[in-house]
C-alpha cells in the first residue's frame, strides 16, 4: 500500500519547525464560497503542531507557504500560497497546536479598494495593471477571443478583486492556479481547451474494496438539468439610434428539455454587434454551465480545479471521456505525525469533485455592477489653452473630484454627452459646457461607465453674471467671448416697475424673419447708430406720423425717386438754402399760386397777382442782350445696399440627417445560433461544436475604405489571422498600404506605391503612427499601437479609419514651425537664429557664427562632425547622432546643401515630430503643454526643466535647470514661464 506524507514549509522558518496534522481545502474555477468564506481559486485550512511554543504571528501571516503531498517519498502535489490567518491553540506534552489558512496571492487584491478610470484598455490589460500594482508577476492569459478595448471602464468603490472578478466575468474569463515548488501562477482562460490536462488517464474503480496502489475515481454521478434554452440581449447606442442592437444565442442539442426557456436582459452592456454576440454567448454558457454536471470522489491529488483529465475503465463507456474539474474539496489527515497520537490511524487523502464534460466552456458567475447612487459633480476639462473643447456630437471631457490619477486635462475621461433643453433633428438648443465649468453628471441605468451631463452649477469661483441676492429678479442668459473679451446677453428683469428685456451683442446682431415682423411700442423708441445705417425695402414703405417729423442732417442729403415725387402740405412750405436753390426740369416747370407769385433778387422783383404783372427794378431790359444764369446740376449719391445675412440658408436647404443609415449595422441583424451540446448519459464522446454559427451568408468585413476593403489578405490582418507587414516585404498588399499613405498626404518619393516596403515606407508609417489620433468613428475600439514602422492590426485599422475620415497629414506638416514664435525663440538662444552657426568641443567649447556652413553639402557637414571640427551644426545645433538619424528617418539625399530648407525640414519632420513628438502633439493636436516643454528641454540644453521632472534615475529637477546641466558645459537660458507662454501663443497663432 502506498505511503502518504504531508509537509508544510513557511518562508523564513526551519523545515523541521512544523508538522502537518491534517488539512482541508477547496479549489474552484474563479471564485466560490467555502465554509461561509470566499474562496478565490483555492483556500486551505492546515492544522499544524510544533515543538516551538513561541512561534509568532508575524512569522506566518502574509508569508509564502508550501503544502506538499508525497507518496512513497515522491512529491505528487504541492500547493503554494500565502498565509492569510494564523490561529494558535493549546500546548500539549511536547507540542503546541497551530492552524493556518492558505490562500492565493490574488486574495491580497481583496484588501485594496479604489475608484478610478481606465480608458482605451482591454480587460487583460486592466487585470495586468491590478496584479502588477500588487506585486503579482506570476500570471498568464490563454485566450481564444481577443477582448476589445474599453473606451471607458470605471472601478467604482470596489476592491481591486471585486473589480477584477466583474470585468473578467463580463468577458467570459475564468481563472485557476498552476502550482510549482516556489510559486503559483494565476492562469486566465476563456475556453476549456486552454486548461492544462493530465498526461495520463485516471482509472475509475467501479468495484469498491480491495487494495489499489494507484489513485482512482469512484462514485461518479452524472446529472442532467433543464436550464435556460436561449438568451436575448438588447442595448442602445446614440450613434445608431434606430438600430436594435439585439443579439440572440440559441442553445443546441437540448432535445431533453423545452426549447422556450428564454433569458432576456437589457441593457446588455455593449455598443457594437461584435461584443454583443460574444456577451450573449457568454451569458448563455453561464446559465447552462451546470446543465451537465458530475459529482465524483477520488484520492488523486493532481485533480485540482481547472485541470482536464481522461477517465478510463468506467462500465458506462460514455463516461470514459475528457472531463474538466470545476471544483474540488480536499481532505488529508496525518495523525501519526505526533508521538502522542502515533496509534490513531494511517495518513489518508481524499477529494470530492465537481466535473463537466471538457468540451463545454465553464463561465464565471457574473458580478453585480456597482450602481452610482445619484448625480455627481465634475469639472469640464480640455487641453492647455483651450476654452471650449468638444467633439462633433457636442460631447466634452470631465474630471471627477475622486479621480486621483488623471491630470485634469483632455485625457481625464471619455467623451461625455451633454443633455440639452431641446434636441431635435437640426433644431433645438445647444450650449457647450466650457473648460472649467462645474457640471452635474448622472449615469445611465446607474452605470459608472456611462456618464451623461444633466446640469450645470455655479460655485465660489464661477459666480452668477449678476451679484445675488441683489439681482434676484433677473433671469439671465449670458455667454462669454471665446478667445477674447466680451459677452452676449439676453436678460429679463422682473422687478415691478423696472421690468426690462436686455439684449447685448458683443459684435453683430443678425435676424432673419421669413414673413411678417410687427412691433408695437406703447411709449418712446430711441435708436442710436454710431456708424452707418442701411435700409432696403423691396416694395413699399408707408409712414404715418401723428405729430411732428424733425430731421437733422449734418452733411448732404440725397433723394432719388424713380417716378413722381409729391408733397402736400396743409399750410406752408419754407425752404432756406445758405447759398443756392436749383430747380431743373427736362420738360417744364409750372409754378402756380392762388393769389400772388413773387420773384425777388437784389432790389428788383417780379410780382404777379390779380392786379397784373409788376416788374420793379433800377432798369428793365427786354431783348437787350445778356444771358440766363445757371444753377448747380443734380449731384445726389445712390443709396448703398445693406449687407445680407451670413448663413441665411432656408431650412429646406439644410442637409437632413439620414435616419435610415442609423438602422444599419455593418451587416443585417444577425441571430446567432450557439451550439451548446448536451450529452445524455447514454451517448458517447459527443464533440458538438460550441462556437456560435451565424445565419448570414457573407460575413461583415472589418475594413471599410474603398481602397483597403477589397483585399482579403488585409482583411485577414484586421482579424489577426495574418502576419504584420514590415520593412523587407514585397506584395500587392504593401502597394495598397503605400497608396493609402499617399492618399493621406505622405511622400514616398519617386518610387511611390511600388509594393516594396522600404525605408521610406517605414518612415511614413512611423510618422502616421505618431501623428494620427484615432477618432473611433469607423472602428470603435482599437489602439494604433507602438511607433515601430510596422503595420499590424491597430495601424491597419487606423489607416482605414483615416481614409474614411478624410484625414490628411499635409495640413499639419505644411506649417513651418521653424518660422513660428516658438522656433524663433528656440533658435535665438541656440544659435542666434544663424543657419551657418556651429560649435566644436575639440580643444574646448567654441561657437562660430556667419560661416559658410549653410553652403556646404550634408555629406561635408557629416565629415566635419566625424573629424570633430564641428560638433553641433546649424540653427538648431544638430549633433552627429541626431543629424544621422534624421537623414536616415527622412531618407534625405546627403548631396543636398545643408541650407535653410534642409534644416527646417529636419526641425519640422524629425526633431518635433519623430524624435520629440510631444511638441508637435501639443502644437497640432491635443497634447499637453507640460509634456511639450519637457521634450523641448530633453532635446535642447538651453531650455529649462520643470520642477519634479526626472533628469536621471537618481536626479529630479528642482525647477529651472538645464536637462544637461550636469556636464558643466550647459545651463538653461530660458525660463519655464517663457517656454510655456511661447508654446501657447504659437498654438493660438496657428488657429
Image (cartoon, rainbow, N blue to C red):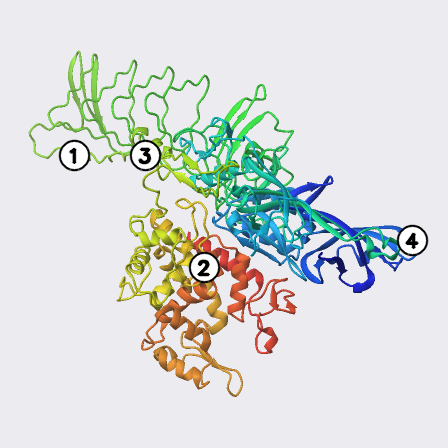
Quadrant of image for the N terminus: bottom right
Horizontal side of 65 relative to 304 (left or right) equals right
Neighbourhood count class around disc 4 (C-alpha, 10 Å): few under 14, some 14–19, many 20 upward? few
Name the residue nearer the viewer: 920 or 237.
Answer: 237
Q: Secondary structure at mark 3?
A: loop
Q: Are marks 4 and 2 in contact (CB under 8 Å)?
A: no
CA gap between label 2 and label 3 equals 35 Å
Which label's residue is closer to the chain start, 2 or 3? 3
Q: Nearer the viewer, residue 402 or 70?
A: 70
Cα–Cα gap, marks 1 and 2: 75 Å
Q: Which quarter of the figure has residue 613?
A: top left
SS category of the residue bearing label 2: helix
Which residue does the numbered mark 1 point to in the structure image?
Answer: 630
- Relative vertical location of residue 208 with respect to residue 850 in this rendering, above or below: above
Which of labels 4 and 2 is toward the front? 4
Contact flag, marks 1 and 2 (Cβ < 8 Å): no
Amino acid at each position: 500500500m502506498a505511503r502518504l506524507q504531508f509537509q508544510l514549509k513557511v518562508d523564513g522558518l526551519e523545515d523541521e519547525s512544523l508538522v502537518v496534522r491534517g488539512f482541508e481545502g477547496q479549489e474552484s474555477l474563479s471564485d466560490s464560497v467555502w465554509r461561509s468564506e470566499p474562496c478565490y481559486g483555492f483556500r486551505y485550512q492546515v492544522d499544524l503542531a510544533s515543538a516551538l511554543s513561541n512561534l509568532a504571528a508575524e512569522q506566518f501571516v502574509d508569508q509564502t507557504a508550501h503544502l506538499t503531498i508525497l507518496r512513497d517519498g515522491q512529491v505528487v502535489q504541492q500547493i503554494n500560497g500565502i498565509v492569510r490567518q494564523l490561529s494558535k491553540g493549546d500546548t500539549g506534552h511536547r507540542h503546541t497546536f497551530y492552524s493556518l489558512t492558505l490562500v492565493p496571492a490574488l486574495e491580497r487584491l481583496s484588501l485594496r479598494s479604489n475608484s478610478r478610470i481606465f480608458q482605451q484598455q482591454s480587460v487583460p490589460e486592466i487585470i495586468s495593471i491590478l496584479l502588477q500594482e500588487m506585486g503579482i508577476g506570476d500570471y498568464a492569459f490563454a485566450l481564444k477571443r481577443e477582448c476589445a478595448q474599453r473606451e471607458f471602464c470605471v472601478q467604482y468603490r470596489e476592491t481591486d478583486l471585486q473589480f477584477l472578478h466583474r470585468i473578467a466575468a463580463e468577458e467570459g474569463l475564468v481563472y485557476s492556479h498552476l502550482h510549482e515548488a516556489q510559486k503559483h501562477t494565476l492562469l486566465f482562460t476563456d475556453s476549456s481547451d486552454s486548461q492544462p490536462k493530465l498526461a495520463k488517464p485516471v482509472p475509475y474503480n467501479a468495484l469498491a474494496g480491495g487494495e489499489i496502489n494507484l489513485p482512482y475515481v469512484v462514485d461518479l454521478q452524472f446529472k442532467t438539468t433543464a436550464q435556460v434554452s436561449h438568451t436575448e440581449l438588447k442595448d442602445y447606442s446614440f450613434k445608431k439610434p434606430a438600430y436594435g442592437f439585439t443579439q440572440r444565442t440559441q442553445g443546441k442539442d437540448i432535445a431533453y428539455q423545452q426549447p422556450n426557456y428564454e433569458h432576456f436582459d437589457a441593457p446588455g452592456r455593449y455598443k457594437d454587434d461584435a461584443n454583443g454576440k460574444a456577451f450573449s454567448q457568454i451569458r448563455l454558457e453561464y446559465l447552462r454551465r451546470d446543465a451537465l454536471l458530475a459529482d465524483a470522489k477520488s484520492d488523486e491529488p493532481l485533480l485540482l480545479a481547472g485541470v482536464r483529465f481522461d477517465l478510463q475503465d468506467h462500465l458506462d463507456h460514455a463516461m470514459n471521456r475528457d472531463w474538466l474539474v470545476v471544483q474540488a474539496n480536499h481532505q488529508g489527515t496525518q495523525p501519526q505525525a505526533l508521538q502522542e497520537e502515533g496509534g490513531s490511524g494511517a495518513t489518508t487523502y481524499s477529494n470530492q469533485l465537481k466535473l463537466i464534460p471538457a468540451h463545454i466552456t465553464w463561465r464565471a458567475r457574473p458580478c453585480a455592477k456597482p450602481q452610482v447612487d445619484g448625480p455627481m459633480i465634475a469639472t469640464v476639462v480640455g487641453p492647455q489653452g483651450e476654452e471650449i473643447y468638444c467633439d462633433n456630437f457636442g460631447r466634452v471631457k470631465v474630471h471627477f473630484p475622486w479621480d486621483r490619477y488623471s491630470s485634469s486635462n483632455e485625457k481625464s475621461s471619455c467623451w461625455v454627452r451633454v443633455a440639452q433643453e431641446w434636441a431635435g433633428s437640426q433644431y433645438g438648443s445647444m450650449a457647450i459646457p466650457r473648460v472649467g465649468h462645474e457640471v452635474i453628471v448622472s449615469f445611465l441605468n446607474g452605470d459608472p461607465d456611462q456618464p451623461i451631463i444633466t446640469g450645470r452649477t455655479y460655485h465660489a469661483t464661477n459666480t452668477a453674471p449678476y451679484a445675488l441676492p441683489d439681482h434676484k429678479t433677473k433671469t439671465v442668459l449670458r455667454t462669454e467671448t471665446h478667445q477674447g473679451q466680451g459677452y452676449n446677453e439676453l436678460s429679463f428683469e422682473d422687478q415691478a416697475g423696472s421690468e426690462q428685456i436686455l439684449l447685448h451683442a458683443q459684435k453683430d446682431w443678425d435676424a432673419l424673419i421669413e414673413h411678417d415682423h410687427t412691433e408695437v411700442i406703447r411709449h418712446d423708441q430711441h435708436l442710436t447708430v454710431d456708424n452707418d445705417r442701411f435700409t432696403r425695402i423691396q416694395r413699399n414703405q408707408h409712414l404715418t406720423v401723428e405729430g411732428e417729423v424733425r430731421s437733422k442732417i449734418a452733411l448732404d442729403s440725397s433723394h432719388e425717386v424713380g417716378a413722381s415725387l409729391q408733397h402736400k402740405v396743409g399750410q406752408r412750405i419754407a425752404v432756406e438754402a445758405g447759398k443756392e436753390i436749383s430747380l431743373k426740369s427736362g420738360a417744364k416747370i409750372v409754378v402756380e399760386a392762388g393769389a400772388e407769385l413773387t420773384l425777388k433778387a437784389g432790389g428788383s422783383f417780379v410780382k404777379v397777382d390779380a392786379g397784373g404783372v409788376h416788374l420793379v427794378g433800377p432798369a428793365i431790359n427786354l431783348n437787350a442782350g445778356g444771358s440766363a444764369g445757371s444753377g448747380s446740376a443734380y449731384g445726389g449719391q445712390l443709396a448703398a445696399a445693406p449687407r445680407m445675412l451670413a448663413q441665411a440658408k432656408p431650412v429646406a436647404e439644410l442637409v437632413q440627417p439620414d435616419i435610415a443609415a442609423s438602422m444599419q449595422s455593418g451587416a443585417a441583424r444577425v441571430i446567432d445560433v450557439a451550439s451548446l451540446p448536451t450529452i445524455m448519459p447514454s451517448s458517447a464522446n459527443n464533440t458538438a461544436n460550441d462556437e456560435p454559427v451565424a445565419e448570414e451568408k457573407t460575413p461583415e468585413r472589418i475594413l471599410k475604405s474603398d481602397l483597403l476593403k477589397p483585399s482579403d489578405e488585409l482583411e485577414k490582418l484586421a482579424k489577426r489571422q495574418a502576419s504584420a507587414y514590415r520593412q523587407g516585404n514585397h506584395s500587392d498588399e504593401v502597394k495598397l498600404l503605400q497608396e493609402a499613405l499617399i492618399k493621406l498626404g505622405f511622400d514616398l518619393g519617386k518610387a511611390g506605391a511600388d509594393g516594396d516596403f522600404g525605408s521610406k515606407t517605414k518612415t511614413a508609417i512611423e510618422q502616421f503612427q505618431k501623428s494620427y489620433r484615432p477618432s473611433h468613428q469607423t472602428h470603435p475600439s482599437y489602439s494604433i499601437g507602438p511607433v515601430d514602422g510596422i503595420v499590424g492590426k491597430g495601424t491597419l485599422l487606423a489607416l482605414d479609419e483615416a481614409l474614411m475620415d478624410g484625414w490628411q497629414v499635409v495640413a499639419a506638416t505644411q506649417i513651418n514651425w521653424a518660422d513660428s514664435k516658438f522656433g524663433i525663440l528656440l533658435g535665438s538662444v541656440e544659435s542666434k537664429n544663424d543657419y551657418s552657426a556651429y560649435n566644436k568641443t575639440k580643444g574646448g567649447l567654441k561657437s562660430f557664427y556667419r560661416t559658410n556652413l549653410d553652403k556646404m553639402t550634408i555629406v561635408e557637414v557629416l565629415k566635419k562632425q566625424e573629424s570633430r571640427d564641428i560638433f553641433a551644426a546649424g540653427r538648431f545645433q544638430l549633433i552627429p547622432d541626431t543629424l544621422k538619424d534624421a537623414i536616415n528617418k527622412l531618407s534625405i539625399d546627403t548631396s543636398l546643401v545643408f541650407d535653410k530648407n534642409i534644416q527646417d525640414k529636419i526641425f519640422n519632420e524629425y526633431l518635433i515630430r519623430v524624435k520629440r513628438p510631444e511638441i508637435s502633439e501639443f502644437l497640432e493636436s491635443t497634447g499637453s503643454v507640460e509634456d511639450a516643454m519637457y521634450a523641448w528641454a530633453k532635446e535642447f540644453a538651453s531650455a529649462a526643466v520643470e520642477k519634479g521632472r526626472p533628469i536621471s534615475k537618481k536626479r529630479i529637477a528642482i525647477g529651472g535647470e538645464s536637462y544637461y546641466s550636469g556636464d558643466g558645459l550647459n545651463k538653461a537660458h530660458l525660463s519655464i514661464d517663457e517656454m510655456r507662454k511661447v508654446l501657447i501663443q504659437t498654438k493660438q497663432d496657428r488657429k
